[in-house]
Image: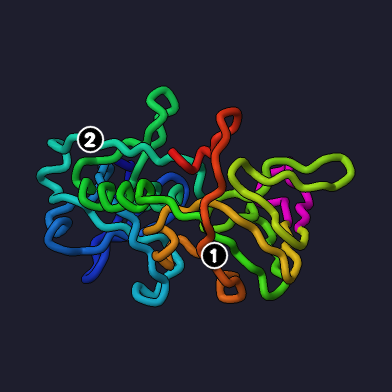
Amino acid sequence: MREFKVLEKKEQYYVCQTGTSYCRIVVDAMSETLPLGDHHLHVEEITDRYQHKTKETVFRLTCAFEDQGDIGICMLSAGRKNTFVYKRCLQLGGKWEPVLGQWVFSSSVQTQVDELSAIIHSDKVYVEASFEETISVSNQSLTLFGFPLVRSVSQNGRVVLNTGMKLMAGDLSCIGADAAPSQSKGIVLANSRIRLFVPKRMLDDARFHEDFMCVVTVEKKRKPRATKTQASPWMS
């Protein structure tokens, strides 16, 4: 649930303000009776600059205005940190509850949350990503299928990958790994090969692919044998 100030109703959308930013809520069967003024609303972000022809964030109500006060909640265990999952949770109006260790949503988006959960918790496959070209990423974390690659960088510049990931060949570097993502830069050299576990449905869904995946070849590999001392967290 988010707080909006509804300023004006136009033919296809409402002009609104949330915080210090202007935004839009589409006019449809759910929102046609939405009055002007301040409201707490269950929404889903559906921003598409080409479809809506605006740079402003666009929302839709996930239930009729009259039913907004009678909606329950649903929760999601999102598993390991993933930038695409995080973005989708925000689009669905989710709020992270650190005490519960789960995302909390309006039950009006239960179907979408269930779909996301099915993707996150689908069977995991072990894959090798081969970089055909050198890629660089600025102002964001270096990720693969949304999973952050870099755990830390030593004083001599050596990159340590996150648990469950293995550099088979090549090299990568990360500048400003300890700074905010907006101040960092990551580089993976051509002919580098990285292995990791990825949920199968995430592997098959383009929404969980970085833009540079067009120069990355992905091949399934035999799962490594887990040891008693350090079993891969991806195997659970």
In this rendering, would 37 be left or right of 133? left
Magenta segment: does it hold 219? no
Dot label at residue 57: none
Residue plotted at (36% across, 46% down): 121
In space, the residues marked 2 and 1 are separated at their CA atoms by: 31 Å
Residue plotted at (32% across, 47% down): 117
Viewport quadrant of the C terminus: top left
Amino acid carrying label 1: it is: Glu
Residue plotted at (40% across, 48% down): 90
Q: Residue 88: x and y, percent?
A: 39, 52
Label 2: which secondary element: strand
Colour theme: rainbow
Label 1: which secondary element: loop
Which label's residue is closer to the chain start, 2 or 1? 2
Residue plotted at (23% across, 35% down): 73
In the image, the segment drawn in magenta is 172-185
Q: Which residue is mark 1?
A: 210
Front one among 218 and 117: 218
Q: Work out whether 79 lies above or below 26.
A: above
Viewport quadrant of the N terminus: top left
Front one among 10 and 61: 61
Dot label at residue 73: 2
Front disc: 2 or 1 = 1
Amino acid carrying label 2: it is: Ile
Q: Residue 152: x and y, percent?
A: 73, 41
